[in-house]
Amino acid sequence: MDLVNITIDGQQVQVPKESTVLEAVRGIGIKIPTLCYHPEFRPEGSCRICLVEVAGARSLVASCVYPVNEGMVVRTNTSEVREARKAVVELLLANHPEECLSCQRNLNCELQKIAADCGIRKIRFDGEKKDYPVDAANPALVRDQNKCVLCGRCIRACSERQGVHVYTFANRGFNTTVVPAFNAGLHEAACTFCGQCANVCPTAAIVEKDDTKEVWEALQDPKKHVVVQTAPAVRVALGEGLGMSSGSIVTGQMVAALRRLGFDRVFDTVFSADVTIMEEGSEFIERLTKNGPLPMITSCSPGWVNYVELMYPDLLAHLSTTKSPQQIFGVLVKTYYAERVKIDPQDIISVSIMPCTAKKVEAGREEMKASGYQDVDYVLTTRELVRMIKESGIDFNSLKSEEFDAPLGISSGAGVIFGATGGVMEAALRTVSEVLTGKPLECVDFHNVRGLSGMKEAEVHIGDKTVKVAVAHTLANARIILDKIRNGEADYHFIEIMACPGGCIGGGGQPISTSPDIREQRMAAIYECDKCAVIRKAHENPAVKELYDTWLKKPLGEKSHHLLHTHYHAQVRK
């Protein structure tokens, strides 16, 4: 690695030749405020908050895009630098709504924090407030252009990370906005509702649609039996939003908190993830042995499903027809569970806690009413659950661990790892291998499909068969695989695709962070949950066995087909 010698605030340091000034400065522990900068995207230097002084430069420079060179002298803390940063932030605040106390991002807003760190106590400029209509006509995301600071991070997340290109800059000067093409609403645009734009927005210009009010009302209704399911990725991220360290495993405390909130039963989506494996694994075996459409591609991620329906409708036959764990759980609650506890399903309110904003859209699909009712009534993101816990005054850290309710709270480690990229594939392989060979696996860990690399390929030997598999996360990587399939260049048998970086652990509804290391910590926690599980294979879950023995009869059977499988269709939007 080539190094250069530079001086930063009087300190002589060596840094990689390809570094920017911002990277060099942060490398020695000096904090420079940034707004448009995000460590995972191409830097643009548009906000000008990261200004520093470089000897010989004609003016202050944006450190996030300014390259280092041999002998450079950088000053980050001169009075001129501090005043310039303050002025930039004040100009942003002059045009920004003064709604901090009622804003969804209050105390978790990057603009708010930068203003405090810069010592701004008075705004010297009297700006013109914007007055754009709020885009809230879809079930998942709310866009408020009045709170937009034109950082462009949503544009880069949608284009660089997801390859969907929904957003762009429009107009000029004070009238510049970030909008979908033709100024369409998200419900009209080719948006997958993955929520990655909301995850990188530094303010509340893009947030998840808040359904906590409706859930509070349901919990207060004595005529309703309110049950809740929690996705695997929530248990390794919820703690972050409540002041705990990243990757904290808070399963038992989460269950206790949900009971304190008033839910009548607290169940685990991991149970229905195990059911998903029974159906999806059986579906894959049938396609593999009976020359069905291959490769088969997982369909657990609704952002991914929206994407393929919008962009690759000619490949829909490759998707597994098995519903996602959220929707399998929803239909089982209002059929199997309702029968067991003798409650009229019209009196059951089914709530899910998900790491995903697209799950809100999935729950409202017309196909998701196999129980005769809407199978999942309300979807809350991890962030919404954080807000409910805070609103209720629960001291989360002091809660003692509690167990999920049976039978829909009994689960396996295989279902837990659904929360990480590669997890659905690994869980399926554990079951498919034993069903096809009739022999127990010597090792249930398939390390070759784990990790955060964007795409992974592997060959898995199952008896006398060699199964070629692929795993991808983010929609930009999904496009690469789909183009291979469309062009006849893919010889895979089974593919897992997740819309979000890292899978559900990086979902659009998770606690917001600008550190990519957090996904590593969440993933490690997911695999720790699996490692510590008593049951590690979906087909060995006793509650799942009972479900099939007493009610469903068999995977891919008549009842399973009606309740647990679905179909897909092309979506046509702008």
Image (cartoon, rainbow, N blue to C red):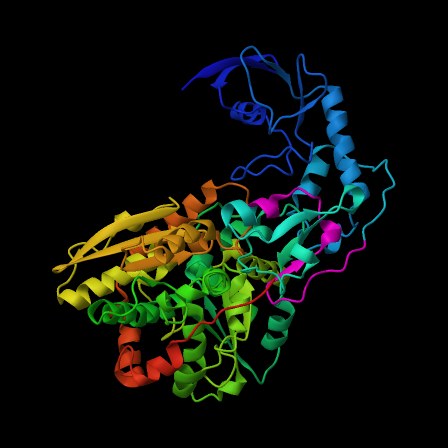
Q: Which residues are magenta?
A: 131-156
Q: Residue at horizontal 77%, vertical 35%?
A: 120
- Measured from the top left, where is residue 360 in percent x and y? 55, 67
Quarter in which the N terminus is drawn: top left
| Residue 166, placed above or below residue 60 | below
Asked if residue 149 is among those painted magenta in the image, a careful observer would answer yes
* Residue in the foreground of this view, choosing between 98 and 399: 98
Q: Is residue 214 left or right of residue 533?
A: right
Q: Is residue 317 left or right of residue 441?
A: right
Q: Main secondary structure of the magenta part?
A: loop
Whether residue 466 is visible, yes or no, is yes
- Measured from the top left, where is residue 289 in percent x and y? 20, 69
- Measured from the top left, where is residue 27 in percent x and y? 52, 25
* Residue in the foreground of this view, choosing between 368 and 520: 368
Asked if residue 170 is among those painted magenta in the image, a careful observer would answer no
Q: Residue at horizontal 51%, vertical 69%?
A: 362
Residue 134, quarter of picture: bottom right
Q: Residue at horizontal 41%, vertical 82%?
A: 337
Quarter in which the C terminus is drawn: bottom right
Q: State the residue lying farthest toward the right.
A: 126
- Measured from the top left, where is residue 536 in percent x and y? 26, 61
